[in-house]
Image (spheres, rainbow, N blue to C red):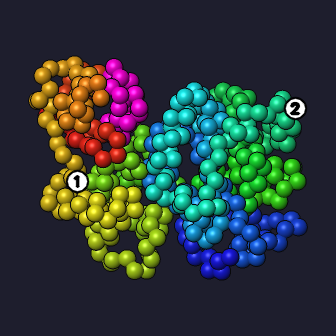
Amino acid sequence: MVANFSWLNRGIVEVFPQPIDTDNESESLEKRLATTNRPLRVKLGIDPTGADIHLGHSIPVRKLRAFQDAGHTAVLIIGDFTARIGDPTGKSEVRRQLTEPEVKQNAQTYLDQVRPILDFDTPGRLEVRYNSEWLSGLNLGKIIELLATMTVGQMLAKEGFAERYKKENPIFLHEFLYPLMQGYDSVAVEADVELGGTDQKFNIAVGRDLQRHFGQKPQFGVLLPILIGTDGVQKMSKSLGNYVGLSEHPGQKYQKLQGVPDNLLTQYFELLTDLPLDELPENPRDRQMLLAWEVVRQYHGEQAANEAKEAAKSGGKEGAVPEFSLTEVNQFPVKLAYLLNVSGLCKSTGEGKRKIQEGGVRLDGDRITDVDATFEQGSDLHGKVLQVGKNKFVRLVP
């Protein structure tokens, strides 16, 4: 396979186990990669607990693509079963359990958003698997077997559980099943490597333990950093408003990225691009514009990147998004389906309703699926981007 491992080491925080850490194991991941006579199976699990992915989520997906380019098999697991439990990692309270239709719809949007990153076309380079395939059929005997591989003490060592226990916040028994089920995914697909953020080390280690329990060779874990958001302070999060969504308009992406704080530019280049870090412009402003252009190019193409750059140069604060004045709406409250029609995004109110039902309508990146969605006053919409499909956008202005 590949002898130069710069692609592997770029941006990673930790590969485990290392030979020095293990008992009776002397093999490193680099040695496995150099000596294997078959493509390794590299697992990345994504729980579709929401409809959208931001650039922080793209980091392990990009590493998965690097393994593909090195000749290995990417195994992308859509956690349609585990999403209905919800990963308790880092949570101070139990997650809301999702319904099967919610998970199914989210899963499709996830695949659409990672398509520009992964190689979906080369035979043998990608498997997309849904973990309901094996988890929904587990009988009580198998579940008891899984539970018997860990103690309550080990579970309480997991990030979040110990703190919740200390504060006497409820921990429900089904939450203990999550790391075991995610770990069992590694058994089901016979993973050689699992990718994840630094907050996933516990879950990946459980996968190693379960593989050993079921007579498989334990996987290696590759941990990647959690991306700091565009505010330069907290991790990228939609709820904090410091995110760049993969489904956002190229102009919005460009505008947000050209404002990334200077101290984060190197990390953004390292984690979100393949550009050589020793060849970046010295001037921080030039770096910002190059970062914005390169990321937009990856997801939307060179022409869209150039258009977003020119729009930003000409003073378009939010990039090349056409505007629609809400003064053209006869009166409020107004239904979303009517707004789609009068703004020109749909040919009729009926088409607007269909697009909403199909999940093709977003407001500032948030998918809206309620055909009766209504807005009480224009001020609720000022400055927001209304989107239909991938290519139709308007910014709603007074």
Q: Quadrant of residue 130?
A: top right
What is the C-alpha distance between the residues marked 2 and 1?
A: 57 Å
What is the count of numbered marks? 2
Task: Name the residue beneath numbered marker 1.
Answer: 319
Q: Is residue 162 magenta?
A: no
- Height in image: 112 above or below 370? below
Of 169 and 111, nearer the camera is: 111
Badge number at residue 141: 2
Disc 1 element: loop
Specify whether 188 is left or right of 144: left
What's the magenta region?
Answer: 352-373
Q: Residue at x 21, y 41 (%)?
A: 395
Which amino acid type is marked by label 2?
Gly
Whether residue 365 is in magenta: the answer is yes
Give how far across and how far down residue 117 sits, in percent.
48, 59
Residue 201 is situated, as x and y percent measured from the top left of the image, at 67, 53
User: Identity of the amino acid at label 1?
Assistant: Gly
Q: Residue at x 37, y 36 (%)?
A: 360
Element type at mark 2: helix
Label 2 Cα crowd, 10 Å radius (few <14 / some 14-19 / many 20+): few
